[in-house]
Amino acid sequence: MNLSESSEEILESLWISSIEGGEATSNFYNMEKETKDKAIRELKTLKLISTSENQILLTKKGQNEAENVVRRHRLAERLLVDILDTEIGLVEEAACKLEHAIRRGIDDNVCILLGHPRVCPHGKSIPKGRCCRKGSTKTTKVVVPLSQMKPDQEGRIAYIHSKGRGRLQKLMAMGITPGMNIRIIQRFPSHVFQIERAQIAVDEEIAKEIFVVAKSS
């Protein structure tokens, strides 16, 4: 389920306050009213929360989704501290940004890489994922060249590694830039994919230079 970042922040805060009895995150308190109202409407439409006069409650479906957000945030903290050697004082802000990039499938890979950690750097429990329950020890590729993706597979462009500066500039002018969501349409005779409303075709050589954070197919 792809939610807006503000919706995920609300889910995270509700889970921490309702399940753990902790305080809502600072991002929740600092969120602009218009942004918060829009996120709440999104969550209600998806039946992840219910609201009364002065209360926002997680539904059963919402609890599961919120737990996943918390899991990704705390795995992001462990990744930053254990692998990237980030100072503990900088972890919270960085993890808030990183958690939104760690989607399902990727979170299991991070968890396996870290040895299924039980607590975050602040000592809070990390909810278990499928990989923990299965005892998985093998990760799968997260970032792959576009040339290896399958029709209908989706992802987000991570980076472009082009041999020529002119080609890189041309790709960027076409809207092929890091951070853009992408969906593969076909692989033959050329690689055709969609970015926003545009469909773009490239040959095999160029497809090998575009690296994508691929969603599990």
Image: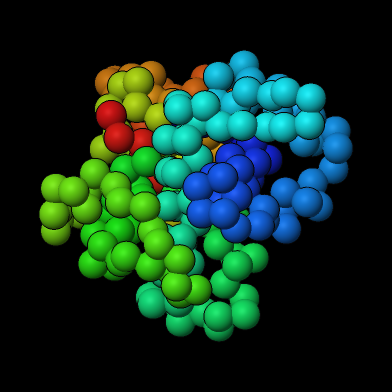
Pick the front one: 69 or 54? 54
Task: Give residue 40's quadrant in the image.
Answer: top right
Pick the front one: 67 or 82? 67
Q: Residue at x 68, y 32 (%)?
A: 56
Is there any visible trace of residue 129 in the rendered image? yes
Task: Give residue 215's quadrant in the image.
Answer: top left
Is there any visible trace of residue 190 in the rendered image? no
Instruction: State the image coordinates of residue 81 (x, y, percent, origin top left).
Output: 45, 76
**Is 59 positioned to the left or the right of 106 in the image?**
right
Looking at the rendered structure, the number of numbered marks drawn on it comes to 0
Residue most extreme to the right = 33
State the colouring used for the structure image.
rainbow
**Is 44 positioned to the left or the right of 134 in the image?**
right
Q: Which residue is drawn at 78% across and 31% down?
A: 54
Pick the front one: 67 or 73? 67
Instruction: State the image coordinates of residue 108 (x, y, percent, origin top left).
Output: 29, 50
**Is 32 positioned to the left or the right of 75 in the image?**
right
Q: Which residue is drawn at 47% across and 35% down?
A: 63
Instruction: State the image coordinates of residue 142 (x, y, percent, origin top left).
Output: 32, 49
Instruction: State the image coordinates of residue 102 (x, y, percent, origin top left).
Output: 44, 49
Whether 149 is drawn above or below 114: the answer is above
Q: Which residue is drawn at 62% across and 16% down?
A: 45
Quadrant in which the C terminus is drawn:
top left
